[in-house]
Image (cartoon, rainbow, N blue to C red):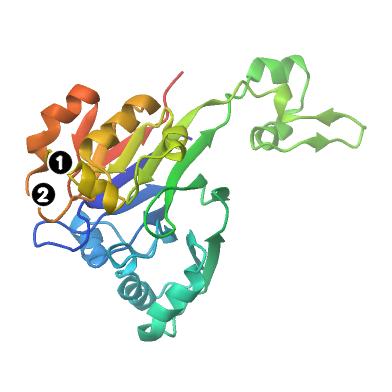
Amino acid sequence: ELEMLDVCLLGSGGMMPLPYRWLTALMTRYNGSSLLIDCGEGTQIAIKEKGWSFKPIDIICFTHFHGDHISGLPGLLLTMGNAERTEPLTLIGPKGLERVVNALRVIAPELPFPIVFMELTRAEEELCLGGYRIKAFRVNHNIICYGYSLEIDRAGKFQVEEAVKRQIPKHYWSKLQKGETIATEEGLTYTPDMVMGAPRKGIKVVYCTDTRPTASIGENAKNADLFICEGMYGEKGKEAKAASYKHMTFYEAAKLAKDADVKALWLTHYSPSLNRPEEYMDEVRRIFPRAEAGKDRKSIELDFEEA
């Protein structure tokens, strides 16, 4: 029954794709379905380079509507259409999502699958889709922008001895395990809490880009297994530039990671002028030792912890 979450940072650049660095986009795979966060120009090539498929993408989340985060969408939609996809595709993003996507769809007006739009209007919103608990939280950029937390919750263990002790017939066990309450013809009621142990630790990935540090990031990144965060600038003396363009430095990202006590930090969304992010990592690790410089196709398999 143990699934794992496959995570791939498809690209790690900001502003424009480069011959050696695609624009920042994240893809996750869980239970046969894939999710994408952001889809800048070239994202579909990045997916191909990784060797993953577009066909199972069921959810695409957008942080905001700047070109480097959404301009790859029309091409991806066309490719998905050509792959004969018929299942609905869910798009999540800030208010205006449907208008923006339909404007981009001038070149993809007819698709063989329906698109479901979910527009975010509040400072924090939670959606349960595709096995994930997706939480969107507003951050601080020069247009409306959201960070995303992806969580996979995990129920407790089925307690066989409890089920036997309470004389619960075996044919009800799997239903109770799935969270169903059972009312029998004899007037007995069996509830999941009779047989299920305490919830176990799930998996949590947080993705955040194009923002200043905010309290909302710190709160939502708390104890994440993986925190992928914008580090636009690594060079010293870029603090003022980062602040005026509403971006973040490596060191600001590291401080957020430290305060949120995450298991690992991957930096992403590098400025095109930043050729070798690794050069700055010693300094970053002085703030947060579990920091890594993200790079295209950097991947991890996150497993549920065995208690």
Q: Nearer the viewer, residue 274 or 176?
A: 274
Query: How many residues crowd mark 2 within 10 Å: few (<14), some (14–19), many (20+)?
Result: some
Residue 234's disc is: 1
Secondary element under disc 1, as helix, strand or loop, is: loop
Give the distance between the C-alpha atoms of the residues marked 1 and 2, in whole angstroms.
7 Å
Q: Is residue 297 above or below residue 91?
A: above
Which residue is depicted at the point 56% across and 49% down? Answer: 125
Q: Is residue 274 left or right of residue 229?
A: left
Residue 68 picture quarter:
bottom left
Count of numbered circles on the image: 2
Which residue is depicted at the point 44% across and 58% down? Answer: 144
Q: Is residue 234 above or below residue 307?
A: below
Query: How many residues crowd mark 1 within 10 Å: few (<14), some (14–19), many (20+)?
Result: many
Which residue is depicted at the point 42% across and 55% down? Answer: 145
What's under tag 2, amino acid-wise?
A: Leu
Mark 1 touches mark 2? (CB < 8 Å): yes
**Res 128 seen here:** yes
**Res 32 seen here:** no
**Residue 274 point in image, percent of width and height:** 10, 49
Q: Is residue 256 left or right of residue 242?
A: right
Q: Is residue 3 above or below residue 44?
A: above
Q: Is residue 287 above or below residue 235?
A: above
Secondary element under disc 2, as helix, strand or loop, is: loop
Q: Nearer the viewer, residue 131 or 183?
A: 131
**Residue 248 point in image, percent of width and height:** 27, 44
Q: Does label 1 or label 2 sit earlier along the sequence?
A: 1
Q: Is residue 45 left or right of residue 273?
A: right
Q: Is residue 229 left or right of residue 197?
A: left
Residue 274's disc is: 2
